[in-house]
Image (spheres, grey):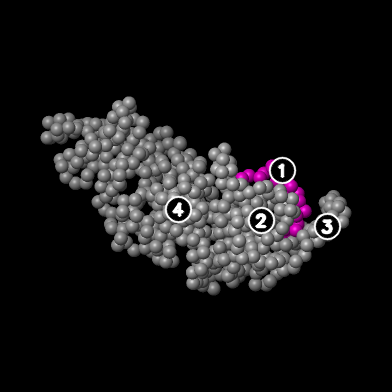
Amino acid sequence: MQELEIYTSEGGGGATRERARVRGASRFADYALLLRGKPAAVVEAKKTSRDARLGQEQALQYAEQLQRIHPGTLPLVLYTNGYDTFFWDSESFPPEKVHGFPARDDLEWLIQSRQDRRPLSVELINTNVAGRDYQIEAVRTVLDAIESHRKKFLLAMATGTGKTRTAVALVDVLQRARWVKRVLFLVDRIALQEQALSAFKEHLPASPRWPEQGETRFDRNRRIYVTTYPTMLNLIHAGTTPATWISPFFFDLIIADESHRSIYNIYQQVIRYFHGYTMGLTATPRDHVDHDTFALFDCPTGEPTFAYGFDEAVNHDPPYLCDFGVLKVRTKFQVEGIRGPKLGEGEREQLELEGLDLDTIDFEGTDLERKVANSGTNALIVREFMEESIKDSTGVLPGKSIFFAVSISHARRLQDLFDQFYPEHRGRLARVIVSDDSRVHGKGGLLDQFKTQDMPRVAISVDMLDTGVDIREVVNLVFAEPVYSYVKFWQMIGRGTRVLESDQAQRRPWCTEKDRFLIIDCWGNFEYFDIHPQGRAPGQQIPMPVLLFRARVDQLAAAAAAGDLDLAELIKADLRADI
């Protein structure tokens, strides 16, 4: 008879020591983790000077021996040398390196789930959540992969095809079938957090969510957690006590929204920290997803777990996405070559190695930003937009529109021009919507007004509305900034691809019809990325200098009407120079 040291793992990584005797054991494990007096896991501890993986087979043999002594589920296996720790659920997956031990609650769920989970192949998908054929196929593809003992998945679905709804439908199946208890949904900005929380609340009301409005303290008793990458990273780093520690086994499923290189260069450690199933969502066309993203989700390069592209969605009958036309406005920035040369792939990779993220270039305070913000070309862009944009049913006002500006000061300048040229709208036609403005977020905020109210019609944004914000009624996009990332460019285009509700009664009065949307490109972005969509000719072919001169005359009239004599004199000087 030999004595076996047994530990019961507690939350926070602590332990309560117990003693137990095992008859007939010819060998013994270093540690065992007990649940209700029965071994749930064994731990093989090697010296720090030895490879932890030398304990793999030993630990498995101990687990099998304990199963013979205590009939039931095969205990889980962990082996470590103090630096590296490996976890092995030998009934389900190969061994994997983990960042720590499971807490007692995690261990209990891992064992209980083994016994309770139902076959995924017979579980029904809720088509009220994700009812389109490709969404059902996407969910079923992931479920089949899980039953084939895979743990990582990547869905490449065009912007507007319902990635979030697809993810919610998957979560619904996995929670009902007892494969998953707690889910982490990661986003890269607060606006997307609010949007995802709303989707889970609508479709999975019985699954408690964190955070609720105004909630900041982490709560361990929820089922759905939606947060930004930096917030989750901070929570992990802050876990230095049993009360604040978040176990690597806390989440059973991690969903990473907007999965592309710019996110993972900084925050992939969040995804790698947790042990559960991991699924990435990306709107990037599969042939432009970088190999690092495929590798992170254990997918061969160019082969996501599931893909559904823009062309497939547009060509479906009826269409799932709106196609677009492009109006190219040749501004003086292009004429003067301010944008700069196109970067080759080698140059792009070198810049990324040096820490420059092409998805998040900040123009604030640069010479380019100053030239753009102060240029008379902005007046031309505003006037051209008001003449050429897709209008509402009255044919007078533009439909819902997004301007992508170079910087906040550029955005403010554009808003000022709308107010000067169209004072009859009393400052409500166009509004700047940027993330550092406290008035933007929440019910009744500027973003909510843009989504749900008649005014404003024009949202002028710097980065905030580039990705993930779903507004079906957007019919005009204005690229008043240069874009250098192909991934970001398609995400921005996706702001206009949503189709309207099929039920006419549910449509907004300012957008009752939408079969296409318009992109006004002021920076030659389509040429930059060598994309050749269907173009749209301007309503009148007037030379740019003439349009610019007319716009300045309009500015002069607006300045005079407002009594701004200093501005009027500056505009007069520009007009004389033009002449």
In the rendered structure, find residue 524 and report the number of the disc placed on it: 2
Query: Which residue is pictured at 34% across the width and 50% down the height?
Result: 150
Real-space Cα separation, disc 3 to disc 4, in angstroms: 55 Å
Q: Is residue 392 above or below residue 292?
A: below
Identify which amino acid the numbered label 1 is placed on.
Asp
Residue indicated by mark 4: 302
Give whichever of discs 2 and 3 has the lower sequence position.
Answer: 2
Q: Nearer the viewer, residue 461 or 539?
A: 539
Q: Is residue 422 above or below residue 87?
A: below
Q: Secondary structure at mark 3?
A: helix
Question: In the rendered view of the protein, which quadrant contains the N terminus?
Answer: top left
Real-space Cα separation, disc 1 to disc 3, in angstroms: 26 Å
Residue indicated by mark 3: 556
Residue contact between numbered discs 2 and 3, judged by CB atoms under 8 Å: no
Identify which amino acid the numbered label 4 is placed on.
Gly
Real-space Cα separation, disc 1 to disc 4, in angstroms: 39 Å
Range shown magenta:
361-382
Q: Whole-percent x and y of residue 12?
A: 36, 36
Mark 2 or 3, closer to the camera: 2
Q: Quadrant of residue 351?
A: top right
Query: Which residue is pictured at 66% across the width and 47% down the height?
Result: 341
Real-space Cα separation, disc 2 to disc 3, in angstroms: 29 Å
Q: Please say whether residue 128 is visible from this viewpoint.
A: no
Give whichever of discs 1 and 2 has the lower sequence position.
Answer: 1
Query: Which residue is pictured at 75% across the width and 57% down the height?
Result: 379
Q: Secondary structure at mark 4?
A: loop
Q: Is residue 380 magenta?
A: yes
Q: Is residue 466 left or right of residue 414?
A: left
Q: Residues within 10 Å of mark 2 (few under 14, many from 20)?
A: many
Identify which amino acid the numbered label 3 is placed on.
Leu
Residue indicated by mark 1: 367
